Image (cartoon, rainbow, N blue to C red):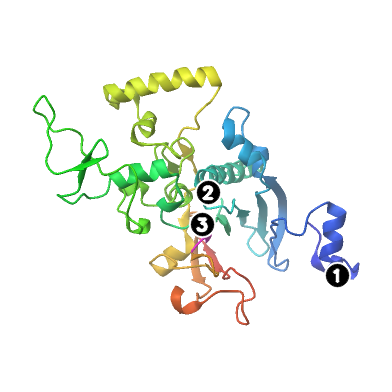
Amino acid sequence: MTQGLQELYRRGETVQGLASTSGVALDDIGLCTFIRREVFEVVSFQNVFLRDVMSDKRPSGFLRQKVESLNDAVQLVLLRKKDTGRLVICANTHLFWNPEFPHVKSFQAELVCGAIARFRDRHTLDDCVPTILCGDMNSVRELQPKYLPKRQQGYLYSLQPQPADAISVDNRTVGETSSGNGQSPSLSRSSSPSDPNLSAWKLPEPWAFSGVFHLLSTGKLEADHPEHPDAFGKTGLEMAQSKPFSMMTKEEKKLMRDSKKRNQRFGKASCGPLQCDLDFDNTYESALGHPVDFTTSTGIFSGAIDYIWHNSKVYPSQILELPPQSISEFGPIPNSMYPSDHICLGADFHFF
């Protein structure tokens, strides 16, 4: 919607009427960017459905079908500050809500970054233009093993520190064992996780964060990350296929060859590492010096899933305060104090 609100009000438009004329269901997810016209001039504006910016060959299979079925989008606005003439890109997005599809959200995050980069390049701008991304990413900061497929949970569980008296070989719990050739066999925990507190698991550093958060904060998500489309739902040996061939073990190389044969037969292509070349910093973490505890709190879920990201050409001078209560003290929203099920985030930025 590019029309001013005053014009819509003058014409007596209603939300129901706009939805009816535009063919949009009222329960659809929408994006809206509000501009202070006395401060900024809108130079360019574009709405982009994420399903429309996938390449012809990447991804394929179920992931492609899933992304194509979703209405998630990114809204792109190029603004010019009237008093200085400085340009800034503001992007607003919403990623898929379902926590059981973190690999879909990781891929969507790359699509968002790619859409921003193409929007910037279309206006012959370079990476020096200030860029801000905000939205509901539907992804917490930490990786959540409980939403991964069971077989992948089992593999991640095998990476946890093992009590000396609870070692298993071939899924049989034993004390001390040895192989026939005098060498100790490969030791791992049970392939089925029994620890109910999955959030307390200690994962390797690159996997400690969710796919979306890791991609946006570091600029890259390797293909072996548990929430990467190529690794999602896979076990250790299958995830090893993302390694450089020269670094693979003999068993991993065999698995890679077999996988390539299957891919040639069934036409499945991998995504490879996901990229975000926008040099983003987490606005609230940068200002606060620590992670945000929560941005939504309902009877079902509480956590930080909304974000503001900025590149190195701007810095946050102040942010909108968050509720002082802890998650347990805060209670569910909306309520009389908070009219939405999401807490409002806001920041003032200064140009470098």
Q: Are marks 3 and 1 in contact (CB under 8 Å)?
A: no
Q: Which residue type carries mark 1?
A: Tyr
Residue 9's tag is 1
**In x, y percent, where is residue 258?**
41, 19
**In x, y percent, where is residue 281?**
46, 56
Q: Nearer the viewer, residue 328 or 72?
A: 328
Q: Residue furthest right?
A: 11
Relative to residue 79, is residue 15 drawn left or right?
right
Instruction: Please determine whether, in this image, residue 116 is positioned above or below residue 345.
Output: above
Residue position marked by numbered label 3 in the rendering:
310
Circle nearer the viewer, 3 or 1: 1
Q: Which residue type carries mark 3?
A: His
Is residue 306 visible from the viewing direction of this image? yes
Give the secondary structure at mark 3. Answer: strand
Q: CA distance from mark 1 to mark 2?
A: 38 Å
Stretch in magenta: 304-310
Crowding near the residue tagged with mark 3, few <14, some 14–19, many ≥20 C-alpha atoms within 10 Å = many
Crowding near the residue tagged with mark 2, few <14, some 14–19, many ≥20 C-alpha atoms within 10 Å = few
Relative to residue 239, is residue 284 drawn left or right?
right
Circle nearer the viewer, 3 or 2: 3
**In x, y percent, where is residue 2?**
78, 56
Identify the residue at image location x=78%, y=55%: 25
Residue 215's tag is none
Give the secondary structure at mark 1. Answer: helix
Instruction: Please determine whether, in this image, residue 226 is positioned above or below residue 33.
Output: above
Residue position marked by numbered label 2 in the rendering:
128
Q: Nearer the viewer, residue 64 or 300?
A: 300
Identify the residue at image location x=44%, y=42%: 220
Quadrant housing residue 88 = bottom right
Is residue 90 visible from the viewing direction of this image? no
Q: Are marks 1 and 2 in contact (CB under 8 Å)?
A: no
